[in-house]
Image (tube, helix red, strand yellow):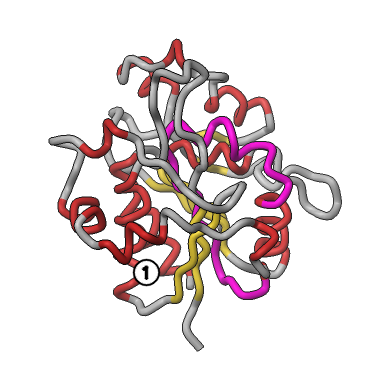
Amino acid sequence: MAKRILHVVSNVAHYADPTQPTGLWLSELTHAYDVFAEKRYGQTIVSPLGGVSPLEPRALKWPLLDASAKAWLDDPNRMALLQATAAPDEIDPTDFDAIYFTGGHAVMWDFPDSEGLQRITRSIWERGGIVSAVCHGYCGLLNTRLSDGKLLVAGKRLTGFSWTEEVLAGVAKKMPYNAEAEMKARGVLYKKAFLPFVSYAVADGRLVTGQNPWSAKATAEKVASLL
């Protein structure tokens, strides 16, 4: 039976300032989707509210728009997937072997406190499945607790978009919180590459995380190797 992956995307379309758009960083989805498609895994997309997942405009411009993301943009069937994502209540966690949280700054607002996403993540983890995230996607793991009340991430090694990268990207002042610092406050053993904006992925058992958009493929490959 083919393995099944649940991708998580955001419903948020702007920063706190509604005139400043944000959304899903498309390549973080497409690079992983491509890796899993090659393995013939089943793939489903969910979001905190279901429905439309807006796209981060900056990720759709050269040089950030790569061949993988452009192929998705040029495929009406795949673009339609982002217009009608599933809601958490429509998802049976027992149908999936792994969950993969995508990023984009948008997720900082709607991932951390989504009880539906927490329920799905907890179920997949406690059944022996894989929990993974790339870039800001790790914000979806900030508040997820297991059945014993402990944070899923406490004491584990993981990575995600660093505060240094926020500053270098010129967006630190727009952030609702410092995700790296919040993870460390939860007892996480945070790791990052020596240089910013390079591919870097960490696997701590069944928890797999990537640091930034350039880490999506490496993250997905680690998930696939575990599966």
Observer-nearest residue: 74 or 133?
74
Residue 152, percent from left and from top: 69, 47
Observer-nearest residue: 177 or 160?
177
Q: Dot 1 lies on which element?
A: helix
Give the vertical position of 104 relative to 5 (above or below).
above
Residue at image point 45% right, 75% down: 42
Residue at image point 35% right, 76% down: 39
Q: Residues within 10 Å of mark 1 (few under 14, many from 20)?
A: many
Observer-nearest residue: 58 or 128?
58
Residue 183, percent from left and from top: 60, 31
Q: Residue furthest right?
A: 148
Is residue 78 shown in magenta?
A: no
Residue 91, percent from left and from top: 64, 65
Give the number of callouts. Answer: 1
Relative side of 2 to 170, left or right: right
Q: Residue furthest top?
A: 173
Identified by mark 1, the residue type is Phe
Give the vertical position of 43 relative to 150 (above or below).
below
Give the vertical position of 167 relative to 98 (above or below).
above
Query: For mark 1, what is the residue?
Result: 36
Residue 146, percent from left and from top: 77, 52
Relative side of 27 to 98, left or right: left
Residue at image point 48% right, 73% down: 227
Relative side of 160 to 29, left or right: right
Write down the region rendered in magenta: 94-116
